[in-house]
Structure formats: C-alpha cells, structure tokens
Amino acid sequence: MVNSSSDRIVRELQEWIAQAPAGAKLPSTRALVAAHGASPVTVQQALRTLSAQGTVETRPGVGAFVRGIRSARPHDYGWQTAALGAPEHRMPPQSAVLRTPSSDMIALHSGYPERELLPERLVRGALTRAARSDAAIGQAPTAGLPDLQAWFAGELAASTPAGLSAPTAGDVIVLPGSQSGLSTLFRTLVGAGRPMLIESPSYWGAILAAAQVGVRLVPVPAGAHGPDPDDVERAFAQSGARAFYAQPNFTNPTGAQWSPERAGAVLDIVRAHGAFLIEDDWAHDFGITSTSRPIAARDDTGHVVYLRSLTKSVSPAIRVAALIARGPARDRILADTQAQAMYVSGVLQAAALDVVTQPGWRTHRASLRAQLAARRDLLVDSLRAHAPDAHLEAVPTGGLNLWLRLPDATDPARFAQECAAHGVLLATGDDWFPAEPTGRYARVNYSGPNPGAFPEAAAVIGRAAASA
C-alpha cells in the first residue's frame, strides 16, 4: 500500500509537473530521496503512481519524464472508404444469437447449451492430459490426428447399412469448427457467383458463410418435416445448382427432422442432378425422442459431404469439427483447409478425442437427452399457457430450439426490444431466411441458463406478442 510519504511526494511532483514542459526530466531518485528524506522504495512508489496516472513516462536506465498531454480530436477514417471500395458481397447483419446477456436477463437467444449441460469433468481432465502429451508441442497432421479421424469415420460407419462401403479415416478432414467448414465447402464445391440450394428457413451461419464466399442462394421452402422433394427437384432444374445445403436432423431453427422416405427421395434427386448434398449434422448429440439419422451413411458414391461438430456438445472452447468427403472433392477440400488454417491445434484434437472415448461420454449423452427433454417440455408448456399468440407449429424431437410463429403484423425489432426491456433475450426469425421472410418468427433456445424462469419468460413473450 502506498504510504503517506509517497502521497506527499506525489502531490509535490504533480505541482512540479504542472509547471514543466512536456518531455522534461524529473529529478533522479537519489535527488528525490535527499530532498524528501524518504527511502528509495517510497520514491519508486510515488513514480509508479504518477506513471499509472499517465502524467509520467519512465524509461529504464534513463529516468522519468513528463508525458505530453494528447489533445482530443475526432478520428478521420474517411480515406479507408476509397481504399476499400464497395464490398464485393454485402454481409448480413450480425445475428442476435451473438449478444452477451447481463446476469439478470433470461437468455433464450443463444445457440449454445449452458455450462451444466456440458461434460465439464471430462473436458477438464482431457485438457490436462492433452497438455502433458506430445500434442502440446508437436504439429498436428493437416487432415487431423489419425485416431480422431478414425473416430469420426467410425461414428458414421455405425449407421451405414450393410451392402454399402463405410467411410474410412482417410475420408475425414478435421476442422477448427463447423463455421470454417461451411466456408470451405461453399468455396470449393460451389464457388463465387454460382447457385446453391438451401432450406428456408435455415441456419443463419450458413447464410453468412455463403455471403462471405459470394455464393448465390436458391431458397427451398421447408416446413415442420423438411423440404418437399418436388420443390427440391424444381429448384435444381430451374437454377442449375450443383449443391444443396441442408440440416436433415433437427434443423436450426425449426427443429425439423426429415423422415427416412423424404431423405431417400432428396438423395435420389441430388444424384440425378449430379450434385452434392452438404449435410450439416450440427445436432447429432442432441436427440431427445429421436436420434440423428445421417443421410451420408446411405451414400457411398461421394454425393453427400458430411459435416459434424463437437463444439456445442463437448465445449465451446474445443472448436473441433470434421468433414467426411470422398473422391476428388475430398482432395479439393483438403487443399482449401491447408490454405486457410494449415492444421487444427493438436491439443484441442487430443482433448476432443479423449472426451468422446471416455466411458463417461456415453453416460453424459444419456443424461443430456433427459435434461433437454425436461427443458423443452417446460418451455413448451409455459408458452402454451402464457403465450397463445406465439404459435408452435411442431414440438421438435431433438436440437436446442423452438420455432415460434408470431402474429403477421408483428414488427420483429419492436417485439425483441419489448421482450428485452422486460428481461428476456430471444432471436427474431428474419436472420434465418435466405430471402424475404415468409412470416414473423422467433427462435427460443431451451438449453440456456435458468430454466426455472421459463414460465416468466413465456409470460413476457405472450404480452409482447399480444401487443404486436
């Protein structure tokens, strides 16, 4: 703690500094000691205080100097407008799901599960072991750690029917999260200026990645059970697209899961058009009353490129995902990932593999299913009781979200602001449409913190929807 002698020296030096020009050198420590009868430690405390206040600049081995006062002036970055030019592809606005809520808010907006739904004990142990392993100081292979590649391949192979060739570790490319995977896929399989089919509504991050790459999106309407195969056929025929991005299992935001029959029909259409189906299995670990049924397991001809992330189910701090692709497409994807990220941290890969191969991982997933079911049902019941004007078209069998239809006259921004003013954060639905919204919607996440507040949140939503 700074003593009274130090305080006295600070006051006297402040008066001296006020009269001195910028850059003037302060008396030496020896001179200040002699002048004030203080110890060198006390003088150094005083100088540190002045330095922290920004009035003194210390230069080791040289001395202390009066810092010049910087006059406030407006920043002028106008020159950058000409240097940057107009953006080639205008980005969608930042999604509301990225907002950081205050502790007193009821957060229904996020796309991530809260901490108590994560395998925290497994993650901490895995990171400790990974930090002590060779992965902490070595360079990981470009396509990923072989054991992790084999695990991802084995997960998909477990769903592969007899008679089809299962994916192998060599088909797997490990990525630093699924968002970078989307950009890579859109860049390598589609390309700037070219069309790509996408469900509408669909994941806002995919819409953002497509905008960054310059892909031209062709919306395909999708309801509570996914897109109609006739609409998919028509969109392929009219657009000439050679790729279709979709989330057949627990679509974000609607929670829809394609039936096996619908998945088979869409796969047949993709094959007939010589196209790729980019399957984003983002919620593989979030089944509740159903499990994920990857379409990629039903294809060994290279038409389906499969994307699966562990970030949401293991930990947001472990950004590890995988792409499974076959043939020349895999080689092109790998070349792009090398150019963008070179390789994924070996520590994160080792930790992810450790978590998912522990006996506790299976136990955690079973517990997670039960917890998500309880949260989903509580929020559904609360909305039905307190928010009759927020219509829930279908109760999802997995995933993390409910998709609410609001009255047609609703102003989305005003609705969200009214909810936030009463302590509830949610995401309005416009961000999930690749073209003009077909209605007014809101996405609410039941995996966030404080599920006991769901009835209170539903009451806020109900009042805001009624007033809309």
Image: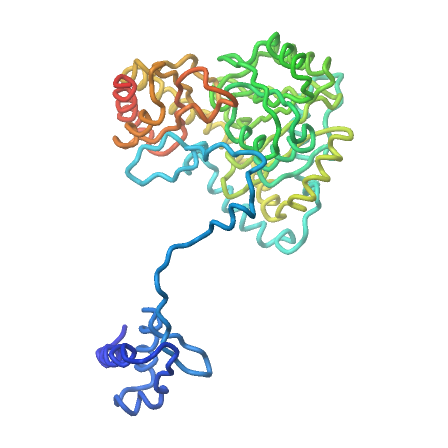
Q: In the image, what residue occupies the spot 33% across and 27% down?
A: 416
Q: In the image, what residue occupies the spot 73% across and 13% down?
A: 272
Q: Where is residue 284 in the image (x, y as percent from the top left)?
A: 55, 26
Q: Quadrant of the C terminus?
A: top left
Q: In which quarter of the image is residue 466?
A: top left
Q: Quadrant of residue 440?
A: top left
On screen, residue 6 above or below 73: below
> Colour mode?
rainbow
Q: In the image, what residue occupies the spot 42% across and 23% down?
A: 429
In the visual, does 381 lie left or right of 190?
A: left
Say how many tags the image has. Answer: 0
- Taking the view exactly as shown, the residue that stands out farthest to the bottom is 34
Q: Position of residue 306 (x, y in %)?
A: 65, 27
Q: Which of 151 and 298 is in front in this view?
A: 298
- Taking the view exactly as shown, the residue that stands out farthest to the top is 230
Q: In which quarter of the image is the N terminus?
A: bottom left
On screen, residue 450 above or below 396: below
Q: In which quarter of the image is residue 146?
A: top right
In the visual, does 292 lie left or right of 421?
A: right
Q: Nearer the viewer, residue 140 or 327?
A: 327
On screen, residue 208 above or below 72: above
- Taking the view exactly as shown, the residue that stands out farthest to the right is 328
Q: Where is residue 295 in the image (x, y as percent from the top left)?
A: 64, 19
Q: Position of residue 296 (x, y in %)?
A: 66, 22
